[in-house]
Image: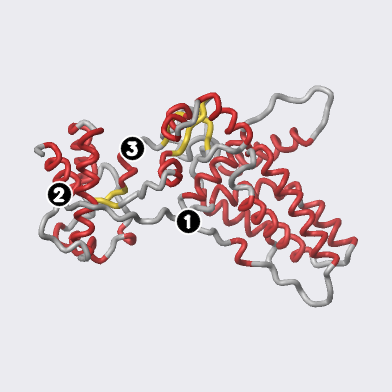
Amino acid sequence: MQDAFKCVTEHVRSAFKSEPICVHVDNAQECEIKRHPQYDDFRSKAVVARAAKLRKPQARPPRSRLWDSMVAMGRLSDMRGDDKWRMAVVDCLTPFLIKKSRIIARDFFADLEDIRSEMIAAALATWATTATGVAPSEVPTLMIKAAVDAAYACAKAHDKESTVGDSQALLAHEWAPPESAINASAIVHDANPRDPAVAEQIRGECHGAKLQRFVHPDILRKFHDDIRTGRRTGVASHLASESMLARIFVTGSNHYYYASDLYPAFVGLPVAAEVLGVPPSAAYRMVRTGTFPCPTTFMGRKHQVYTKALMIHLNIPDIIVHPDDVENGAAHARWE
């Protein structure tokens, strides 16, 4: 059996490649902080920060927010169906499990690979159970404790047969917001909404009608020009439905995009609190205790909330739309 700790490290390195790591907004080009190391340097920094937290000298070093940001980014990437930050948190914790796993395997004559597999599975299970209601600063400690407890349980139950680790624990549980029915009878007439192509048009035109009230036409026009000219990427082709593929075939170009692509990637905590109907002071208190309903991250000295996380919490579907449909809906609403 291959060493589970090494598997996790290889998986994370492959996910991050050689690109600069941004733990603030997950995109070094959009981040206000310009110092972004590659993954190995970032991992070393995280391990040092965690080790400093575990030491108990008389004069503690200033508190690092690095691990809080890692946990927050892991929760955000989980919402996107991406496991790289969740696995990065696990990978940065493995240095604190290596020695313990060897001691347990030696003392109980257990297989080291089995012990480490159980540790990884337990850490990931704890990650899932602490997704809400637990402050980010507490999550790494709980993951390590669960990993050590699982290692002892595995060792005590050890026999001559190899233990089979729960491979399903390494798979992400992807959750997507449910599609909501949209009544577009005011925009599209004499159409069969059961036809996928018509339903797609209805969604796009409804979205455009809503944007007409809140987005300046020049901003919408420029965004669509960027989509059409390829200056901004849209939805990946493999996500296209049958009706979308038919339209792409006719035009020769894929201009579809997610509705959220038009919005800012992050909003400030006070803005998110206002949307959720929470007083700003209470929102900051909830962030400290891990009870704020959406994951937050730090950008400089400010708390930021991922816009898509806010949409998911409010049950706002992140629909895929076409510029033509959005513009038709906006024009219809403008001339109503």
Residue type at mark 2? Ile
Q: Residue furthest top?
A: 59
Q: Are marks 3 and 1 in contact (CB under 8 Å)?
A: no
**In the figure, is residue 75 to the left or right of 112?**
left
Residue lying at 68% horizontally and 66% vertically, measured from the top left: 2
Evaluate whether residue 161 shows in this view: yes
Quarter location, residue 201: bottom left
Q: Residue furthest bottom?
A: 161
Say which of marks 2 and 1 sits in front.
2
Residue 132: % across, % down: 59, 45
Residue type at mark 3? Tyr
Residue 153: % across, % down: 81, 62
Residue where numbered disc 1 is placed:
175
Q: Quadrant of the N terminus?
A: bottom right
Residue where numbered disc 3 is placed:
263
Q: Quadrant of the C terminus?
A: top left
**Secondary structure of the residue carrying numbered label 3:** loop
Relative height, residue 323 to residue 238 (above, below): above
Relative height, residue 307 to residue 107 (above, below): above
Classed neighbour count for the residue bearing mark 2: other residues with Cα under 10 Å, few (<14), some (14–19), many (≥20): some
Residue lying at 40% horizontally and 48% vertically, measured from the top left: 315
**In the figure, is residue 109 to the left or right of 210?**
right
Say which of marks 3 and 2 sits in front.
2
The alpha-carbon separation of the residues under discs 3 and 1 comes to: 21 Å
Q: Nearer the viewer, residue 3 or 204?
A: 204
Q: Nearer the viewer, residue 231 or 41?
A: 231
N-term-proximal mark, 2 vs 1: 1
Residue where numbered disc 2 is placed:
187
Residue type at mark 1? Trp
**Secondary structure of the residue carrying numbered label 2:** loop
